[in-house]
Amino acid sequence: AQSVSQHNHHVILSEAASLELGCNYSYGGTVNLFWYVQYPGQHLQLLLKYFSGDPLVKGIKGFEAEFIKSKFSFNLRKPSVQWSDTAEYFCAVNAGAGQGAQKLVFGQGTRLTINP
Amino acid sequence: EPEVTQTPSHQVTQMGQEVILRCVPISNHLYFYWYRQILGQKVEFLVSFYNNEISEKSEIFDDQFSVERPDGSNFTLKIRSTKLEDSAMYFCASSQDRAALYGYTFGSGTRLTVV
């Protein structure tokens, strides 16, 4: 079964600092990878996703992530964070055979706090 | 931008009561999901639904849970006899295709409190 690990539970940064949130997944086959963000009191929003092609994917709000197949990793990065980036970040993977819907498997989430 | 709508936003119910959580997925989406998040824990998959039948369900989704798409627009999650440990945030999601090439769209969630 697929699993996703996010190593950082709570990250605290100052504005303008660079950000990297770790994500590793466990699955032997082809996977699709996602990062979602949940701002306080809001629903999960898609930041970016990787299906194939260039392993460096760019998402919304200046975020990017790099898929490294050999390391089973899909780390999220942002060169300069803002106070408004304070949120919970979830890495997720989907995969599966058959004709039905492919579920998302989430990591534990990383709470990001940006101090002004 | 199209949204997934969930109602109610918050429901308080007594242990042993039945609850129905409602979701209106995006109209051209074909795949539907329920997830839950117990406070302080990760988002867990409950069930996926396609072509009017369950595609997959997790171990959490036992006989007290059921899903339905009664009228072609709503997608409901019923919990037959609620337990204290069912208290959680329940998220509905939908996707246009099975691999979610365009991503999964999530609703704002229903916070269920069982007392």
Image (spheres, rainbow, N blue to C red):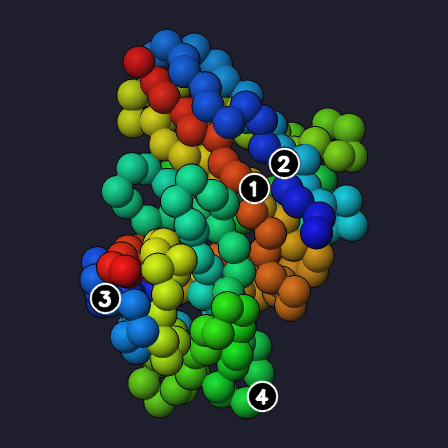
Tell me the number on the disc at residue B107.
1
Where residue A108 sits, quadrant-wise, is bottom left
Tell me the residue that label 3 is attached to.
A13
Q: Amino acid at mark 2?
A: Thr
Tell me the residue that label 4 is attached to.
A53
- Say if residue A28 shows up in the picture: no
- State the SS at label 1: loop
Tell me: residue B49, above or below residue A63.
Answer: above
Do the residues at pointers 1 and 4 share their chain? no
Residue reaching furthest front? A116
Count numbered badges in the picture.
4
Q: Amino acid at mark 4?
A: Gly
Q: Position of residue A76 (x, y in %)?
A: 38, 74
> Mark 1 or mark 4: which is in front?
1
Q: CA distance from mark 3 to mark 2?
A: 34 Å
Do the residues at pointers 4 and 3 share their chain? yes
The chain under label 3 reads: A
Tell me the number on the disc at residue B81.
none
Q: Residues within 10 Å of mark 1 (few under 14, many from 20)?
A: many
Q: Amino acid at mark 1?
A: Gly
Q: Tell me what residue is drawn at x 46 percent, y 78 percent.
A: A64
Q: CA distance from mark 1 to mark 4?
A: 29 Å
Q: Position of residue A102 (x, y in %)?
A: 56, 58
